[in-house]
Structures are given as structure tokens and as C-alpha cells.
Image (cartoon, grey):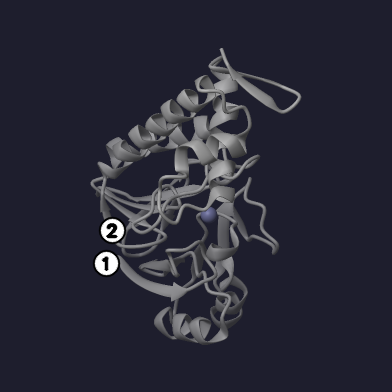
Amino acid sequence: MLAVLPVRTPTLPPATHTNCYRLGDTVIDPASPYLDEQERLAAWAGGVRRILLTHHHEDHVGGVAHLRARTGARVYAHRDARLPFPVDVTLDDLDTVDTGDGVLVALHTPGHADGHLAFLVDGTGDVLAGDLVAGVGTIVLVPPEGQLAAYLASLARVRPLATTLYPAHGPACPGALADQYIAHRHMRTGQFLAALRAGASTPEAIARAVYASIPGADLILAALQVRTHLAWMLAEGLARQENGTWTFS
Ligand SMILES: [Zn+2]
């Protein structure tokens, strides 16, 4: 049976924890860099033989070395993941891992991170979603790694497979959340395009125009989101850029 242990991590507010999932002899994302949390995780994860990683970001891999040393578990990740430690087994799209209590199917789902993997529990609608969606807070696409086209394609691919999404941050969510995420990104693109048409010509100016009315918005992160969307709009022929100045087309 799928089990979850949220551990404290240096993640993006308002999230404060990362979910470590366990199925059979396999743990996904032993995430905490803090020793007290690592000890708690090792006690919870006794007897595990495998560590699977959704992606290489700091708030997902901080406890790998500790859990590997404690259990001798082998570490699995996608070949594009840029990890600061060796991986024992590289996973490709649709590779399977038999946990002894269900089979996990790796789904290569880039967009948030290179080599991002989600895991479908085979024969169910349960998808361990990593940072494809969030039960608390939002998913940030930071350029150049963050890629909107790939992210939208990953959401669309997972959607028909997922009855329930188990995100890395926050509680489980209905699969339909993926549709809402896709719609939300298109809504933001529309807002950024409107700001361009109204004369905003830099990511910072566009971010101020769109997010200034949102209480507590982080305008630095917002400008990074705008950059990711502008790169997509450029590729789609919706925007042009010259010497750092953006215009609509
Ligand atoms: Zn991440």
C-alpha cells in the first residue's frame, strides 16, 4: 500500500515539507537535508531496497546519501537528471520497477526539471507526480531548465492516466487538477500577452503589470515565470525580442 511521510525541507514557501512516498521496498524522494528528519525517515523506511528520484532539485534529494548509507538501497533516476552523486540505475520512459507491492511505471515528464519522472502505480489511477503539480503552493518553471511547452505536454500526458495525483508538496489531488494547471498556464500567457500589448516590454515590467495586484506575490519569481512564458510565445510566433525588449507579433 502506498504510504507517505512528509519531511521538512528547504523548499519554496508556502510549502515547508516534501512528501516521501513508500511502496513495497521502494522509497521515492527521500528529501530532507536535516539530520533529525533523515533519522525519522530511516526509521520509517527500514528494509527498503530502492530509492527512486522524481528529479534532481535540492528539496527532493537531500536525504539520499543518508538513506543509502543506512539501508544500502540502490538509487534510480532518469538519465537527464543532474545529480551531485552517482546513480546506480538510470530509468527511461516506461521503464518499470517491481516494488513487491505494486509495479511503478516511470513517466518521463520534463518541463519543471530536466529528467523529471512521475510514477504510475501500474493497474491503478495513482500517479506519484513529483513537481508536476502541487497540493500546496505552485510549480515554478525557472529558465532555462523550465520549459513551458514540455511542461504542458507532460501534464497532458499524465492527465488521462491519473485518477489521483500524489504531489511532492501538499495533499493528494484529483487527476483533473492537471487540466486546471494547463488552463492556468494558458490564462497567464493571455495576461502576459495583454501586458505586452499595453506597452510592457521587459519580463520585470510584465510581471509588475500582472502580479502587482496579487497580495504577497514574489515579483522576482514572477519575472522568471514571465521569461519562461515569453520563450514559449517566441517559439509560437506570438512575441518578438530585440536587445532585451519584447513586443507582441
Ligand atoms: Zn523541483
Q: Look at the image and tell me whether residue 242 can be seen.
A: yes
Callout 1 amino acid: Met
Above or below residue 122? Residue 39 is below
Where residue 51 appears, as percent x and y from the top left, is 51, 66
Image-based side of 89 in relation to 3, left or right: right
Image mark for residue 172:
2
Image mark for residue 104:
none
Where residue 174 appears, as percent x and y from the top left, is 24, 49
Q: Quadrant of residue 177?
A: top left
Image mark for residue 1:
1
* Residue drawn at (41%, 45%) of the image: 213
* Residue drawn at (48%, 24%) of the image: 193
Q: Are marks 1 and 2 in contact (CB under 8 Å)?
A: no
Name the foreground residue: 15 vs 129. 15
Above or below residue 140? Residue 200 is above
Number of numbered discs: 2
* Residue drawn at (49%, 27%) of the image: 195
Callout 2 amino acid: Ala
